[in-house]
Amino acid sequence: MIRDDDVPVSASVGDTIIDEHVAVSTATGVNGARKVLSLGRGAASDQTVALARQIAAKLGASVGVSRPLTDRDDFSVEQQIGQSGNTIAPELLINVGISGATQYLVGIDQSKLIISVNRDANAPIMAQSDYVYVGDADAFLKSLAKRLGIN
């Protein structure tokens, strides 16, 4: 949800406002989310992440990540899924570019419907998924975006 607010900024006598900048956190936690689009190393390029965020917004989903993606500045521990992150139980979980390390699989065990995308048909995540797509993460996301009307 995006909300416009007027926030009064004033300086006390003797203070000088040099610059005004509103800081908005891009982090959206995954705890309690009904839908989650989760990204792993196979979906870590800036272009892929940007498209995934658009798709998540269109689906009303939170963006989650596997542990390696928390090294990026635009993801936080609040978005990390797995044993050392968050255990989630969404109605829908779409995993993109996640191989499925044991620590991650523990964190998604209670998810209702799991869709996973990975180039490796034998990746551990595939065995825990209800539906799988064996192929490139970028190609999958571009096709999904097109179907959702995202240019």
Image (spheres, grey):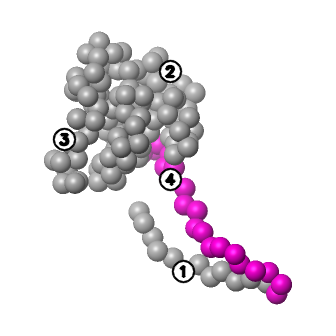
Look at mark 3 in the image and give the residue it sits on.
143
Write down the quadrant of residue 97 in the picture.
top left
Secondary structure of the residue carrying numbered label 4: loop
Do labels 3 and 2 touch, CB within 8 Å? Answer: no
Residue denoted by label 1:
6
Q: What amino acid is labelled 2 in the image?
A: Gln
**Sequence-wise, which precedes: disc 4 or disc 3?**
4
Residue that appears at 58% across and 62% down: 23
* Residue occupying the point 37% across, 33% down: 43
- Nearer the viewer's eye, disc 1 or disc 2? 1
Residue at the spot x=38%, y=21% of the render? Answer: 99
Q: Is residue 130 visible?
A: no
Quadrant, the C terminus? bottom left
- The kind of residue tagged 3 is Ser
Residue 139, given in percent of the width and then of the height, sits at 23, 35
Identify the magenta region.
13-33
- First reached walking from the N terminus: tag 1 or tag 2: 1
Task: Locate residue 87 relative to residue 47 in the image: left or right.
Answer: right
Amino acid type of disc 4? Thr
Circle on res. 26: 4
User: Residue 90: horizontal and vertical position, in percent?
Assistant: 38, 39
Name the outermost residue toward the right: 14
What label does residue 103 carry, if any? 2
Magenta region's main secondary structure?
loop
CA gap, disc 4 to disc 3?
Answer: 25 Å
